Structures are given as structure tokens and as C-alpha cells.
Image (tube, helix red, strand yellow):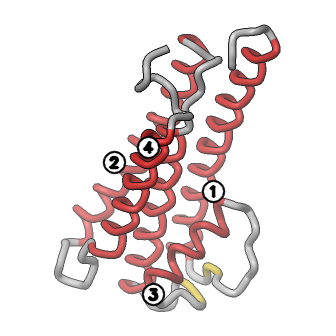
Amino acid sequence: MTKGSTGGLPWNRTFLLVEVVAVLALYYLLPLEEGAWQVVPRWALFALGAGLICWSVVHTARRQARVNPGELSPHVPVLLAVSGLTLFALADYALATAYPGEFEGLETRTDALYFALTTLATVGFGDIHAQGQYARALLLAQMSFNLVVIAGAVSLLTARLRARRHGGGR
């Protein structure tokens, strides 16, 4: 096993932490004010980003299960989950600012990130919720995305546990 091949080494965890912080920094720095982007390109980029993340999660899970299930690295799944989370938080925030009546309680980017995380975690405290049809449609897409991410994570974890049971993992 080479030093760069495992997800358990400290430098790799540090690199993952730096990437996650970078994704979150971009989340807060991306201009979303009216006029910064036209509405159609903004939503087209959102749809493309969500599709790419879903495809990457499924592809990574299948590849990991085929190639080397005993060497599960959390790097790609964690980064994909954080990217998806921030992508949906941006969409929620953009929708809330473009159409103020769509969400109740969502006013800032931090509110949107909090709401996206509570939706991913299936907690749903109720302090922020969808009121309009656009917000509900977006949440349907977000919940479907969450199912793909969770199913991918479960698939990777199951492959890792199966490989350990058969002596293929550490």
C-alpha cells in the first residue's frame, strides 16, 4: 500500500478538510444577488451540478465495490456530499431571494445551509419550511438527491464491511 492510496493517513484527511472548507468558502462568496446571474443560466448550472454530483456518487460507489472494497476512502463521498449540500443550499437561497414567499424563515445563506443540512439529515425541525410550489418542487429534487447520496454512502460502507469480513480490508 502506498502512502497516497489510503484515506486514513493524516495528510489525506487534512487535504479533505481543506477541500471542504474551500467548498464552503465558495458557497458564501458566490454572487447571487439579482442581476449577478441571469435566472435561466443559474438554474441550468444548478441542474448540471446536481446531475454531475449524483452521477459521481453512483459511479464512485459502483467502482469502489468492483475495484477494491477493502480500501474505502471517505474522500470522494464526503466531498460529493458537501458539494451537493452547498449546491442545494445555494438553490434554496437563490429561490428564497428571487421569490420571497417560497420559504418561511429562510433569509440568509446560513439559514439556507442549515435548512439543506436538516433536510439531508432528515431532521426537519420546522423552523424553516417550504410554502410555495417552486420551493416544494426544489425540495422534491433535494430529497431525491439525498436518497442517492445516502444510498451511495450505504453501498460504500456495506462493501467495506463485506471486504473486512472476508479478510480483504484492514
Residue receiving disc 3: 108
Reading the image, the residue beneath label 1 is 143
* 70 w.r.t. 113: above or below: above
Point 65% across, 66% down: residue: 119
Q: Looking at numbered disc 2 in the image, what kind of residue is underneath it?
A: Leu
Residue 69: give x, y in percent of width and height. 63, 17
Please tell me which residue is depicted at 51% across the width and 35% down the height of the picture. 9
Query: What amino acid is at disc 4?
Result: Ile
In the image, residue 48 lies at what x, y percent? 34, 48
* Label 4 residue SS: helix
Q: Residue furthest right?
A: 165
Residue closer to the observer: 30 or 43: 30
Inter-mark Cα distance, 2 to 1: 17 Å
Label 3 crowd bin: few (<14), some (14–19), many (20+), radius 10 Å: few
Mark earlier in primary sequence (3, 1): 3
Which of the two labelled residues, at mark 4 and mark 1, occupies the earlier sequence position? Answer: 4
